Image: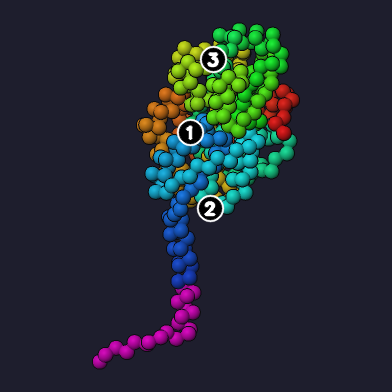
Amino acid sequence: MPLSLPTSPRPWSRRAFAALLGPALALGALASHAQAYPNKPITLVVPFAAGGPTDVVARTLGTLLGRQLGQTVIVENKVGAGGTVASALVARSAPDGYTLLLHHNGMSTAPALYRKMSFNPLTDFEYVSQVVDVPMTLLGRKDLPANNLQELMAWLKANPGKANLANAGLGAVSHLCGMLFQKAVGAEVTTVPFSGTAPAMNALLGGQVDILCDQTTQTTPHIKAGSVKLFGVTTKDRVRALPDAPTLAQQGLKDFEVVVWHGIYAPKGTPAAAIERFNAALHVALKDPAFVSRMADLGAEVVPESKQSPDGLKTWLTSEIAKWGPVIRAAGVYAD
Ligand code: ASP
């Protein structure tokens, strides 16, 4: 005898099915949504001008990340106010994993340098990872009448207010380095802010400014080409990429140390699954032999794995805010 199947379920059985399957279907949809990340291009915001050291790290990593994630990583330069414009923008962006920020020490110095800020570095973000550490170099224009740090300090003291000290914007690390240098020397100089290191470096190469303190990732090729004067590196120890350059501390500027560290941030509320997926791709990118050796040639070092994590970044950021706040307040300088 043929089986007779009902052509349409009775109302009660439809409801029963929905009740039974509802939670399972919802979970399935969530899981497939999480697996789908990223399903469109990701924007990595950089707070300084294109062609500068932060931009170079972002673009080099962006290409590697894009390969790992199967999506384009678009680098967008949102310059202004020492990185606070970009930070505020990302803090207010949709927390969906498609807008991230690559920033440096500026995230930790901004709370002391700016009296008014529209975001809080410690509460408005999810933390992704630290990336690379980069030393800085103190440079002069090629025809500056000083050939070493002692001569530079004597020249600055003999010409109060005359020397132009370039930086990548008020609140940039080059600004911080310049301020610390000025304070250590006890000489007055005129600060000239740019929108990033790329234009500041061009001004130094063109002789429109006298001094610049900036990352080795940007300055090493110019130092090696002899198109600028090098007065020292800002790290505690010498930099392997520039073995002949003494540190500023070795030349008498006791305890002078500035290292540029970088972190990747997402807006608060970004799903943990998206951050984990991004971080997995980042771990692979940071191990890429070509990336590691390119960074080493430019004096930069990939951070140890312990720092390649949300906790590693948050802990470091917290300690840097605690470290620089008193130094900047004691110097009595503000960027706004
Ligand atoms: N090096 C710059 C700074 O001083 C920023 C940049 O252009 O990457 O913060």
Q: Residue at x 52, y 17 (%)?
A: 228
Please state which of the two labelled residues, at mark 3 or mark 1, is closer to the viewer: 3
In the image, residue 293 lies at what x, y percent? Answer: 39, 27
Distance, label 1 to label 2, CA atoms, is 25 Å
Residue 112 placement: quadrant: top right
Q: Which residues are magenta?
A: 1-20
Please state which of the two labelled residues, at mark 1 or mark 2, is closer to the viewer: 1
Distance, label 3 to label 2, CA atoms, is 48 Å
Q: Which residue is mark 3?
A: 142
Q: Nearer the viewer, residue 121 or 204?
A: 204
Colour theme? rainbow
> For the residue marked with disc 3, what is the amino acid?
Lys
Q: Which residue is mark 2?
A: 96
User: Crowdedness of circle 2 by 10 Å Cα count: few (<14), some, many (20+)?
Assistant: some
Indicate the secondary structure of the residue bearing disc 3: loop
Q: Residue at x 48, y 70 (%)?
A: 22
